Amino acid sequence: MKTDHVDESMSRLLETAAPQMSAGWQARAVERLTATRPARGISRRLVLAAVGVAALVGLGFVPIPMGKAPGALERALAAAEQATTVHMTGHAWTTKGEWDLDRWDSADGFSRQEKCSAGKLVELNITQGDRVLWYLVDPETGQTSATEDFWPTNRIKFGELPAAEGKSYLARMFDSLEMLHRDLGVAAPEVEMTEHRERGLWRGAVDVVEAVWSVQGNASISGVNYREGDRVRVRAEVDPDTNRLLSMSQYKFEGTWEPTYRADYEWDVPIPDAGEFRPPKGTRLNRHTWWQKRADQTIAAGTTQDWDVVLHAVDVNRRGDVVLSLHRAPRPESKISRWQDGSLRWRVEAADDAGVSYRVGGGGPWGSYFLVSYGTATLVPEHRDRNARSVTLTVYPYPRGQTTDQSVTFRSIPLPPRQNTDDLFAAETEVIQY
């Protein structure tokens, strides 16, 4: 099992869950593109941390070990289960520079993430349900761009996977490698994990959870890139009275443990309101609506031993190419591992009522959440001199491994009239130049 696979699965645990869209979600989106960053008061905890650093340097003080703290991580996860919001501020040290990070998450699925360099916003992500907005600044040219997407995969909550039964969105943000291994069948790397209590001169007692492991393959953890064999240490501090996670630090061993990432957390704090999204002048916004128009409709559905397969839509362009909009998901009783390559596309065999066969000539919008995927397949007819009225499809949802031969057939699917365009995806992308 490669560590980068585990890290990717951990990062997906941070993806937003999918409540129904609330009215005025864009009004909640933070206006970070032209506005000045709001001033924030310094929390008592950060003041104490600063005093503690001064004491450590000036007095040579080190934390006093106070024995083991069994179950600290489990208690922190249980406390996250009861939370409604979390606010994270962080800093990352990378080979490409340093970044300040700011993130707000709500149990109703709202998420806002900011990334700043030298005090300037370089990346913004706002998620509300199945709508996702990205704003980026090109690091070389300074050119700004924005994309608004509809992600039906956000509707697939972890409640449909064994690891998430009875767990809230915020608790899933801090799931552990052990839970991935136990509930998803993911082979975690060998992790040295300890739980103990420390007492500082100024801050009082904290429960500390530390995990150390060696990277297998290339990996990206909290936005920091690692290579095969790198030693990584993650340290989480938990308030022993409230069991709330206070901070999480990440280190890379380079003769000594060098910091690569630090995050501090506040729980059950109000998420600030925001103005409307107004990109700065010169920004090009691409708004993709393909799945917004198709995710809620069903033309046909079927099952194999391990898969549920849904045909959501059929579209035909001016040339007669047929575009299928499909969805696959592992069946709840399936024994296949939930962690495989979610980007693997399905294989499709097709022939129309005129006897013309089709080949897969390309794809289009695609999104995966573990093995649950929504995507398209473009079928190109071998002959274009006939007008077909229907098509029969055989879909192999995951043409690899033990599920290679599993397929479902949809017979005599009516073909809609041709649209007066060659590129159906571009025709359904709204482009706004600010």
Image: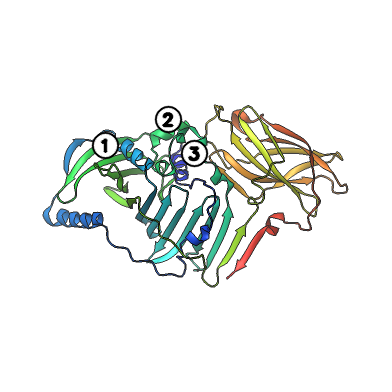
Q: How much space separates mark 3 and mark 2, taking CA atoms?
A: 15 Å
Could you tell me the amino acid type at mark 1? Glu
Q: Residue at x 73, y 33 (%)?
A: 409
Nearest to viewer (mark 1 / mark 3): 3
In percent of width and height, residue 383 lies at 84, 46
- Along the polypeptide, which appears first: circle 3 or circle 2? 3
Q: Residue at x 17, y 44 (%)?
A: 199
Front in this rendered view, residue 304 or 190: 304
Residue that badge 1 annotates: 195
Q: Residue at x 64, y 62 (%)?
A: 430
Residue that badge 3 annotates: 158
Residue 271 in sight here: yes
- Along the polypeptide, which appears first: circle 2 or circle 1? 2
304 sits left or right of 341 in the view: right
In percent of width and height, residue 27 lies at 50, 62
* Label 3: which secondary element: helix
Q: How much space separates mark 2 and mark 1, taking CA atoms?
A: 20 Å
Residue that badge 2 annotates: 182
Could you tell me the amino acid type at mark 3? Phe
Q: How much space separates mark 1 and mark 3, taking CA atoms?
A: 27 Å
Residue 223 in sight here: no
